[in-house]
């Protein structure tokens, strides 16, 4: 490795012994790479190496890093106020952001609840759905229906609708509410739709409609649960069944929102209108944690029908810095040809990753929008693969059997080619 111990910063040793990293052992830590700064689509390590970032920091830095317009928005807001409580106070950045979100969202979304992370927005969405039915005097509608291989966050309510196997339900069995899990659609989007895909879902919703408050789904792309893609027809069927059986539909657009799959929100591709929508991740262009729950008029009125209010209010609700940078990020997105960029990335990923299909260790290659996935036949050795990738000058974070990229939309074709050839090399080395 070109970075000898001598080039490591002095704080790293302490950090490794005392600071938890996500999904990692504190006692037997995996290597971490110290970063000094980031700009454009590059991370600069403490030893001076520059890596092309194919992760957009877990899918949120859609414009890359150190973006002048976004820096300016934060600096301007900082001069006015970085934060005030949202209980009893209101401010322009939140109002303007809410207005822009409702303009962009699918028709019917009328109200915005600002949360501080994606997981919290999922908690709020679930709480709204439960409270909606309680207020109608239908307390028995208290369960959720979803599909396996989903991911909705790491807090308890969200965890209970994550995939029961990969979602660590076994660690907390007995503590998590029992929800219903249908077979996920297996249709590839290039195959013709077959109604058999919806059968398991239809059976569950038909049988349990009296106790199901809401369906929750990631539209078109199941992200952290396995980077699986499915056809819009599935969503259309789900939406029809929800309407038929009086079940609310929550779409979790936290990963797919803001253009990642080629449309502003993935559910647009299916032409469906959810009752509740969660957004997060790319909302602030990757600058500050923030999420939001959007709801229809029907849900909003229903939640209050029993005379109660929604009992939720994070300390940093509608943080003005986050609102200001989110507003700037969305304006920046709309000012450029984001759709053309995502399409160009999609074409290039399809062309350049196709060669990976011939590799022994590769089970599947799939691309949707600005998402490129290599599914290996076996779980990858993350530390080894990451080392290979860093040596090649790129940053990716494989998990399970997957080596994948969700690059910033501003990545140049030559930078993307470096990424895809590093993915090919990593996949061909067989680890
Ligand atoms: C990342 C993610 C979440 C959780 O968001 P956090 O901000 O990490 O809490 C929820 N749902 C989906 C689909 C996600 O991709």
Image (spheres, helix red, strand yellow):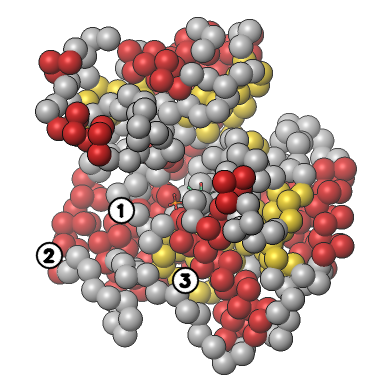
Q: Nearer the viewer, residue 179 or 172?
A: 172
Residue at 30% in and 49% down: 287
Name the residue tied to disc 2: 79
Q: Position of residue 96 (x, y in %)?
A: 35, 70
Q: Earlier in the sequence, mark 2 or mark 1?
A: 2
Which of labels 2 and 1 is toward the front?
1
Name the residue tied to disc 3: 112
Residue at 37% in and 58% down: 290
On screen, 162 above or below 111?
Answer: above
How much space separates mark 2 and mark 1, taking CA atoms? Answer: 17 Å
Residue at 53% in and 33% down: 371
**Where on the picture, by quarter, is residue 229?**
top right
The answer to whether residue 203 is left or right of residue 300 is: right
On screen, 108 above or below 258?
Answer: below
Q: Position of residue 38 (x, y in %)?
A: 23, 34
Regarding residue 394, the answer to whether it shows in the image is yes
| Mark 1 residue crowding within 10 angstroms, few (<14) / some (14–19) / many (20+) | some
* Total numbered labels placed on residues in the image: 3
How much space separates mark 2 and mark 3, taking CA atoms? Answer: 26 Å
How much space separates mark 1 and mark 3, taking CA atoms? Answer: 18 Å
The answer to whether residue 120 is left or right of residue 365 is: left
Which of labels 1 and 3 is toward the front?
1
SS at circle 3: strand
Name the residue tied to disc 1: 288
């Amino acid at each position: 490795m070109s970075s000898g111990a001598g080039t490591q910063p002095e704080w790293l040793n302490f950090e490794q012994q005392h600071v938890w990293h996500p999904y990692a052992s504190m006692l037997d830590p995996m290597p971490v790479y110290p970063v000094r700064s980031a700009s454009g689509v590059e991370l600069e390590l403490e030893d001076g190496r520059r890596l092309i970032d194919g992760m957009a920091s877990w899918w949120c830095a859609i414009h890359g890093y150190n973006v002048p317009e976004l820096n300016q928005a934060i600096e301007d807001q900082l001069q006015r106020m970085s934060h005030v409580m949202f209980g009893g106070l209101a401010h322009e950045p939140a109002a303007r952001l809410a207005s822009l979100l409702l303009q962009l969202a699918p028709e019917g979304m009328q109200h915005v609840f600002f949360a501080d992370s994606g997981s919290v927005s999922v908690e709020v969405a679930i709480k709204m759905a439960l409270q909606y039915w309680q207020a109608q005097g239908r307390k028995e509608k208290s369960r959720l229906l979803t599909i396996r291989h989903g991911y909705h966050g790491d807090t308890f309510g969200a965890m209970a609708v994550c995939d029961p196997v990969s979602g660590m339900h076994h660690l907390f069995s007995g503590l998590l509410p029992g929800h219903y899990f249908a077979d996920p659609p297996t249709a590839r989007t290039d195959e013709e739709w077959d109604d058999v895909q919806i059968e398991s879902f239809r059976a569950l919703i038909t049988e349990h409609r009296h106790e199901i408050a809401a369906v929750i789904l990631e539209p078109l792309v199941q992200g952290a649960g396995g980077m699986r893609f499915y056809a819009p027809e599935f969503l259309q069927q789900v939406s029809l069944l929800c309407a038929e059986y009086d079940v609310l539909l929550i779409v979790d657009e936290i990963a797919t929102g803001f253009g990642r799959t080629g449309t502003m929100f993935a559910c647009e591709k299916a032409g469906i209108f959810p009752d509740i929508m969660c957004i997060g991740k790319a909302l602030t262009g990757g600058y500050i944690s923030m999420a939001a729950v959007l709801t229809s008029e029907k849900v909003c009125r229903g939640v209050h029908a029993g005379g109660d209010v929604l009992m939720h209010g994070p300390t940093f609700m509608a943080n003005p810095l986050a609102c200001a940078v989110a507003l700037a990020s969305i304006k920046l997105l709309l000012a450029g040809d984001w759709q053309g960029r995502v399409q160009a990335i999609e074409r290039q990923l399809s062309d350049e990753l196709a060669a990976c299909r011939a590799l022994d260790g590769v089970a599947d290659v799939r691309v949707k929008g600005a998402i490129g996935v290599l599914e290996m036949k076996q779980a990858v050795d993350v530390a080894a693969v990451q080392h290979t990738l860093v040596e090649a000058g790129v940053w990716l974070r494989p998990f399970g059997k997957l080596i994948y990229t969700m690059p910033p939309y501003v990545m140049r074709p030559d930078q993307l080619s470096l990424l895809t050839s590093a993915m090919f090399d990593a996949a061909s080395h067989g680890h």
